[in-house]
Amino acid sequence: MIKTLVQKVIGTKNDRELKRYQKRVKKINALEKKYEKYSDDELKEAFNELRNKVINKEATMDEVLEDSFAITREASKRVLGMRHFDVQLIGGIVLHEGRIAEMKTGEGKTLVATLAVALNAMTGEGVHVVTVNDYLARRDATEMGKLYNFLGYSVGCITGDIDDDLERKKQYEADITYGTNNEFGFDYLRDNMKYSLEEMVQRGHNYAIVDEVDSILIDEARTPLIISGPTNRKLDNYLRADKIAKQLEKDKHFKVDEKDRVILLTEEGISKAEELFGVENLYSLENAILAHHLDQALKANYLFEKDVDYVVRNGEVVIVDEFTGRLSEGRRFSEGLHQALEAKEGVEIKEESQTLADITFQNYFRMYKKLAGMTGTAQTEATEFSQIYNLEVISIPTNRPVIRKDHDDLIFKTEKEKFNAVIKKIKELHKKGQPVLVGTTSIEKNELLHELLKREKIPHSVLNAKHHEQEAEIIAQAGKKGAVTVATNMAGRGVDIKIDDEVKELGGLFILGTERHESRRIDNQLRGRAGRQGDPGESQFFLSLEDNLLRIFGGDRIKNIMERIGIKEGEHIESKMVTRAVEKAQKKVEAMHFESRKYILEYDDVANEQRKTIYKFRKELLNPEYDIESKIKENREEFVENILNECEIFSESPKEDFNLEKLILKLKEELRSDFNLEELSNKDYDELKNYILEKLESEYDKKMSVVDENQRREIERILYLQILDNGWRDHLYQMDILKTGIGLRGYNQKDPLVEYKKESFNLFMELVQNIKFEYIRTLHTIELRDEKEEEEIKRLEEELKKMEEELKSQAVLQYGESIQNEERKTPIVSQKKPKRNEPCPCGSGKKYKHCCGKSGPKKGVLAESHV
């Protein structure tokens, strides 16, 4: 009560911030007449002077903001024919300050971004503008690019169809780069797998503006970006588990918890599964993989629905994004779930993959020095934006008041009754000529409605993940008189639906929601398709007690209300109390999803610190100026100290107790270096260590003397990178395994996150040591040969082969075929280079293509393992 009273007197924090921004807007408006008088060249020159001041640190961006915004607005009037409204100027200041501008649909967020982009690009460090799809990235880069070009900026655009790294690098080198969140994130991961600085495409993370920030930083944040490779696991287990899952009975053998999306086997179910698998204990260590496959098969069959969670297209299971309703091409469910779905649908099962590099969107976007965002709906997630990204949400008033009528929800008992009412309402609106956009939460419901409308012979357009190529075109036509468009809730986000005067007279666009989404924001986004820029419009949701949200999270309470009132078939209730109950159910789900995202982030934060350490060192190695010689000496000393410890030779022990025989064997085995008792005897710990180090260094220098200094450093650098990458991949696999089972520690009254931090730290320390030691082993066991020498060996091999064939043919001519079956001596040829899939001769146990054959030193030098 006191808080409400204070807010009435002095206003909310949002109100106070808006007042502060309005003072700056007055200053920008005061400059309009000044810059209107400038010619195009004078305007460009004035902007260039501001840029030079910022570059030369004579002024800060904040100090030149008013002039920069005024010039950008004037340039926009001339180039685009669009003048920024005052509320758009406020939006621009919010974005410049690294905050989220909440602006309703149709308020021109694309134009708002130009103000902050033009100002922040002055530093020359690059600005990234992030959009939800390739179409919007291309559209905005092309349309707004005209304005940026006028101001002297270059504009790039990153889309999924750019395969050439040089082309990608060129787009990133532009002052301003548009692209999707996936492309920016994957390029970062790919860059950290490259073997030279020249191959890296991104040039840093300076400032990013994220369009539809709630969709990218919240909805998609539950799915990390992963670059993966095959694991070579058996695929028949997926089919076996699927067959068994289909033989188990629901409620008898297992319980389905739709709320938490888990399936629990009963005692009877475990016994039945053991019988069908033919094992004694399904949960013993050797059968753990079978239990995991069965769990995923049950989820695939009883929790994941075709045409809701995924579609089958061209013999492939393709994920449907639950928030956008779009197909997520190339994305696959992890931990064997995708393979379980492939087994369920009887399509080709593709190999399960292993993580080679990964990052969450939260940790990717937190790398930017400054981050900002725009959306029509952010206040419902303000807490998450603040806690996770340190981003404050500022709600900006509309340019014209919103006059859209938002009607109360209508609630029916059954889904059938609800859809009958929906069709009746659509017929009524269509007859009147008022355009209607019908929102559905899944493809399945979308296609059901399509069939019902076809039956009623109502002309309509359908937009879902199966027909998303024409998305922008279909959505743009949705405001025409008499148009009926059936779309998944988020379809057409970022595309304006324009209406003419005749449609305005009819009441504007009618938004008809057929189900409430789990998130209030998605419902608000759907509503926001109508009533833009002061246009008329209406919105209403039709719900039923059989809808997933109400059935799982809030049905009983609403059901009781309906039963008390005594609702008959076909009737509905319309009440504020019911609408509040629905919103309460949505808040429950939002809180659950927030916890889920927080959980993913807490675990990824552990890996993120390790990732940053590895990637930072990797980047240092790529720099030709890096002092790799000192690093080798440091690693060699650590390696020798470790060998001495393993041989129980310590600084405090008397030299008579030193086990020199074991030490000699160890040095021979690990480094192929020959030492004898005589040279190592009668030395204390420091003398012994220094003697071994000097000899090893001398042997190494002698071996590397066949190449020049630059080639030597290049070989050392490439080898270090290969060993680092292989070690990091193995480490990520270990971390995946650790994460999968860590939750069970909770049953032992231990905090799984604390345990994960502890275990992953130990794994990381082990990784660091293993990389250093493997590097020293490799450097001391490779042999270098001049390329001329290699060519000579190849020539001799070919000559010997020819001689062998000639001898063979002569023998056949003289003695007939029988000679071929007799034993005879063949010329000795040197060992051939192993094939790509053969075991590597270095003894690592890996395939040649993944080890020494992966990326060799520069031309002119050949490295091979000395076995």
Image (tube, grey):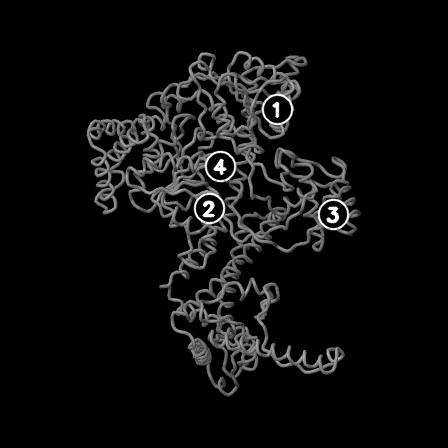
Which amino acid type is marked by label 1?
His
Q: Secondary structure at mark 3?
A: helix
User: How far apart in space, not on screen, are marks 3 and 4 (Cα)?
Assistant: 37 Å
Query: Do the residues under discs 2 and 4 have CB atoms within 8 angstroms?
Result: no
Tag 4 residue: 218
The residue lying toward the viewer, choosing from 97 and 216, is: 216
Which amino acid type is marked by label 4?
Ile
Q: Secondary structure at mark 2?
A: loop
User: How far apart in space, not on screen, are marks 2 and 3 (Cα)?
Assistant: 40 Å
> Which residue corresponds to the image point at 58% horizontal and 36% vertical from the top-left?
320
Q: Is residue 414 above or below residue 56?
A: above
> Which residue corresponds to the image point at 65% horizontal and 46% vertical from the top-left?
339
Mark closest to the chain's N terminus, 4 or 1: 4
Mark closest to the chain's N terminus, 1 or 2: 2
Q: Quadrant of residue 395?
A: top left
98 left or right, relative to 453: left
User: How far apart in space, not on screen, are marks 2 and 4 (Cα)?
Assistant: 27 Å
Q: Which mark is residue 240?
A: 3
Which amino acid type is marked by label 2?
Ile
Q: Residue furthest bottom?
A: 678
The residue lying toward the viewer, choosing from 121 and 207, is: 121
Query: Do the residues under discs 3 and 4 have CB atoms within 8 angstroms?
Result: no
Q: Residues within 10 Å of mark 2 (few under 14, many from 20)?
A: few
Which amino acid type is marked by label 3?
Arg
Tag 2 residue: 162
Tag 1 residue: 450
* Closer mark to the observer between disc 2 and disc 3: 2
Mark closest to the chain's N terminus, 3 or 1: 3
Q: Residues within 10 Å of mark 3 (few under 14, many from 20)?
A: some
At which x and y percent is residue 282? 74, 50
> Which residue corresponds to the image point at 56% horizontal and 37% vertical from the top-left?
327
